[in-house]
């Protein structure tokens, strides 16, 4: 059973690096020698790198600075930057980030810009082709061109780039390049503001670019419309616990205020008559979709409480974005202080400011809103017009963008990208479509983030987020005045009434986007009477919300939400240590709901001794996915067997093309809508027709549950032995924190651990999980200006394996130990200080 569900680990953040380095790990490529054992920490080529990445007390001369800057480090590697100007603050942030994470920075931008092949050869061509087609680089250029140089983001981007380049300049003088550059002879180019916008685009893509409409199209073709809409409905049959219960405002769609940077000009003149167009070009080359460039897993938690739910009053917030856990981490923790900023928290390497954290008065974290952000259009084409498409009553010429992809050790690849008014045309999941993605619009989201860093209350925080467009996120909030809230910010596209945007749309113009949900109508909550707000990727609004947000493929069913709400009800007035407990809670709320029904079904079954022992384990179980729990193994294996027993006959009969998209359509991945349907039918509709196989004998839920239970016991016996008491969950379920290179020995190796994909302490993906809590944050406010915060993430501040700060935070994260998150003036436990001075 375990072998069925062990898929290749989906690299979310680390995909930006893994594609670039995997080729260098075994046999080598081109002029790059095979590395093999040379990558073992503490020896080999790592030991030959003399670049100093762990801080020591020193004075550095940076001619780009206006004034001296102080950079202090704790013993664990957390940095605090104190600058006398905002310019110097962001310059120092770029410098410190590059000094500790240069390889990660460079490879992230290479991925987004379609330049991996220049470093790694043919292994990078697939990714480069896709990224150049989707157009993160084109979008970044458009965003930078639209950014006023004297705006907050314009100044921050310029200063940050100067800081990165200051460190690159130091390496050019010393020659102490990170290992990959020494091996290949390739050097990182100077950093520019466009590079930061590309890295920001990579984040947006990995959180918001998906193929849901194309998956629905595949299901329609196989299952048919009726079964698809019943089993993968737009609205879930179960309550998803929205954080905004309404009533809702119904306002006209807000217009898109900036152009799609990856679309043809809608005002271009029509194409010439048929027969007068140019000869067919190579622009219609199929472009495949690598799994590593889209959103596949989602899990994040953020909640805040106030009033009687918090011991002593005030407000308390916890954040827990669930992303790929790798070495180095997705996050880089910093504290920043200047005249305009006093903020601390998790930063995205390559981007100025703090993405999740606190300042002097407010704290915030975020979750993926999961709303629709990617639409697909089937263009009307004609063989008589090979370079045209039909839109808005006329044939239009396709615009083309031409690229060359330098391939290390191979021939340069030429690429032509075709653009329509909807976006780039490409083949995705075997379907030729144009891609209209909200991440390709030329917005300035960095201004919104920096304004949120400076906000002092909920009103200013919400005003700042009005300009946040992509990816759509839920921002959960708590402040020093005892207020809490949550805001959905971002563009959620709307199409004409009567269209079905969860399927590919017509490209003729009748189904084009008419605008986005107005900001004032997006789901939000502020100081609710229940004194709790929580966001766990669930649908944020109820079924009577007047706009299209997404389908059951988009949203989490709410199992983590239920566990968080129950915790706050059961525990009463809470303290910081209670939130560390909740962060690490592994209660499986789906088990809470379904195990009683299973036990009832088994009451009428004649069980063998081993089956009776497994049944008794469930009867005595507290529904927690603890690593030493054999009942957790019985539950997990039963649920997998139950889902397959119900749906596999239909998948086989209808020939559902699971191989087209295993991440979404394969039953081994336990698709969310099917889990939700199974829960609903088991508890409320046990005689649903889905339980009876096509052309098979009648079955109901209890019958299928009994058969699935027998199968589960047999599977566990084969895999773990004949004694149910020894079937510990940790024998099936492990976590690891792999190196971004994929090299064994550089990551944190698999270990038995708690959790599952839908527990608060999430372990997403496969049974060997590398996806889960990536940055845990808790902030507690006790009065105006009075508050404390703690945080931890699984990794370290440096991307060099020989550094003491490479993986030093992992044991703390595993042991549920948090470290203080202080603003710079309160930093303590200083291990070293850099004094950055001007070059005068």
Image (cartoon, rainbow, N blue to C red):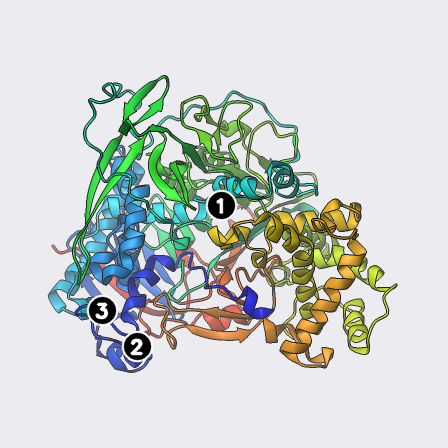
Q: Which residue lies under the disc numbered 3?
A: 29
Which residue is found at the position 61% from the left and 41% from the top?
Answer: 228
Residue 594: image location, x then y, percent: 75, 56
Looking at the figure, which quarter contains the N terminus? bottom right
Q: Earlier in the sequence, mark 1 or mark 2?
A: 2
Q: Which residue lies under the disc numbered 1?
A: 361
Q: Which residue lies under the disc numbered 2?
A: 39
Mark in the foreground, 1 or 2: 2
Q: Is residue 13 above or below residue 429?
A: below
Using the numbered discs, state the Cα–Cα distance from disc 3 to disc 2 in whole angstroms.
16 Å
Using the numbered discs, state the Cα–Cα distance from disc 3 to disc 1 in whole angstroms.
53 Å
Label 3: state its secondary structure.
loop
Q: Is residue 158 left or right of residue 556?
A: left
Residue 549: image location, x then y, percent: 55, 35
Q: Given contact means CB atoms under 8 Å apart, are the residues at marks 3 and 2 in contact? A: no
Q: Is residue 328 above or below residue 215?
A: below
């Amino acid at each position: 059973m375990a072998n069925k569900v062990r898929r290749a680990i989906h690299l979310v953040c680390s995909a930006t690096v893994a594609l670039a380095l995997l080729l260098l790990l075994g046999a080598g490529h081109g002029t790059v020698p095979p590395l093999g054992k040379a990558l073992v920490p503490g020896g080999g080529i790592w030991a030959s790198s003399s670049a100093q990445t762990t801080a020591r007390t020193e004075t550095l001369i940076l001619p780009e600075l206006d004034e001296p800057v102080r950079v202090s480090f704790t013993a664990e590697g957390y940095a605090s930057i104190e600058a006398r100007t905002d310019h110097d603050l962001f310059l120092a942030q770029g410098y410190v980030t590059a000094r500790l994470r240069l390889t990660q920075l460079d490879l992230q931008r290479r991925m987004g810009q379609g330049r991996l092949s220049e470093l790694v050869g043919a292994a990078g061509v697939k990714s480069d082709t896709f990224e150049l087609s989707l157009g993160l680089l084109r979008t970044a250029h458009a965003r930078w061109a639209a950014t006023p140089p004297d705006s907050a983001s314009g100044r921050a981007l310029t200063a940050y780039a100067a800081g990165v380049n200051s460190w690159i300049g130091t390496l050019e003088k010393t020659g102490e390049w990170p290992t990959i550059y020494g091996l290949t002879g390739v050097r990182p180019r100077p950093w520019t503001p466009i590079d930061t916008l590309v890295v920001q685009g990579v984040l947006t893509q990995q959180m918001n670019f998906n193929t849901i409409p194309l998956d629905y199209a595949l299901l329609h073709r196989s299952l048919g419309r009726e079964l698809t809409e019943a089993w993968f409905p737009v609205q879930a049959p179960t309550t998803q616990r929205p954080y905004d219960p309404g009533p809702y405002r119904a306002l006209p769609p807000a217009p898109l205020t900036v152009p799609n940077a990856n679309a043809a000009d809608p005002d271009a003149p029509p194409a010439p008559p048929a027969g007068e167009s140019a000869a067919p070009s190579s622009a219609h080359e199929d472009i495949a979709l690598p799994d590593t460039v889209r959103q596949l897993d989602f899990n994040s938690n953020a909640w805040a409480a106030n009033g009687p739910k918090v011991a002593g009053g005030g407000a308390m917030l916890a954040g827990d974005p669930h992303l790929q856990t790798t070495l180095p981490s997705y996050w880089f923790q910093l504290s920043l202080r200047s005249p305009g900023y006093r903020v601390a928290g998790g930063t995205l390497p390559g981007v100025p400011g703090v993405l999740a954290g606190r300042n002097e008065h407010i704290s915030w974290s975020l979750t993926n809103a999961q709303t629709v952000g990617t639409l697909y259009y089937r263009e009307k084409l004609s063989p008589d017009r090979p370079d045209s498409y039909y839109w808005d009553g006329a044939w239009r010429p396709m615009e083309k963008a031409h690229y060359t992809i330098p391939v290390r050790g191979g021939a340069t690849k030429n690429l032509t990208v075709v653009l329509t008014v909807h976006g780039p045309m490409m083949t995705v999941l075997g379907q030729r479509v144009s891609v209209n993605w909200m991440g390709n619009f030329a917005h300035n989201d960095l201004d919104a983030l920096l304004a949120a860093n400076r906000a002092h209350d909920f009103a200013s925080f919400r005003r700042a987020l009005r300009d946040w467009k992509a990816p759509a996120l839920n921002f959960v909030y708590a402040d020093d005045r005892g207020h809490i809230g949550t805001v959905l910010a971002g563009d959620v596209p709307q199409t004409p009434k009567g269209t079905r945007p969860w399927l590919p749309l017509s490209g003729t113009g009748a189904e084009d986007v008419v605008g986005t949900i107005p900001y004032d109508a997006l789901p939000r909550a502020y100081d609710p009477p229940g004194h709790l707000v929580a966001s766990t990727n669930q649908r944020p609004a109820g079924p009577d919300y007047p706009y299209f947000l997404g389908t059951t493929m988009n949203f989490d069913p709410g199992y983590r939400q239920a566990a968080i709400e129950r915790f706050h009800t059961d525990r009463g007035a809470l303290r910081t240590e209670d939130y560390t407990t909740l962060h690490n809670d592994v209660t499986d709320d789906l088990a809470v709901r379904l195990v009683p029904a299973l036990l009832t079904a088994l009451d009428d079954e004649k069980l063998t001794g081993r089956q009776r022992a497994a049944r008794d384990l469930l009867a005595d179980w507290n529904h927690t996915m603890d690593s030493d729990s054999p009942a957790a193994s019985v539950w997990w294996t039963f649920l997998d067997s139950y889902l397959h027993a119900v749906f596999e006959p239909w998948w086989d009969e209808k020939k559902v093309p699971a191989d087209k998209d295993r991440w979404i359509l394969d039953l081994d991945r336990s698709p969310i809508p099917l889990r939700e349907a199974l829960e609903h039918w088991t508890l409320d509709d046990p005689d649903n027709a889905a339980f009876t196989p096509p052309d098979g004998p009648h079955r109901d839920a209890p019958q299928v549950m009994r058969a699935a239970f027998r199968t589960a016991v047999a599977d566990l016996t084969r895999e773990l032995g004949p004694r149910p008491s020894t079937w510990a969950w940790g024998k099936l379920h492990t976590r690891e924190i792999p190196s971004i290179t994929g090299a064994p020995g550089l990551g944190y190796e698999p270990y038995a651990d708690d959790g599952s994909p839908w527990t608060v302490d999430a372990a997403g993906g496969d049974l060997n999980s590398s996806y889960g809590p990536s940055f845990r944050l808790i902030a507690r406010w006790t009065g105006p200006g009075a508050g404390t915060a703690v945080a931890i993430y699984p990794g370290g501040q440096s991307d060099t394996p020989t550094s003491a700060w490479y993986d030093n935070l992992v044991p703390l994260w595993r042991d549920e130990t948090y470290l203080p998150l202080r603003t710079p003036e309160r930093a303590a436990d200083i291990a070293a200080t850099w004094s950055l001075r001007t070059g005068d």
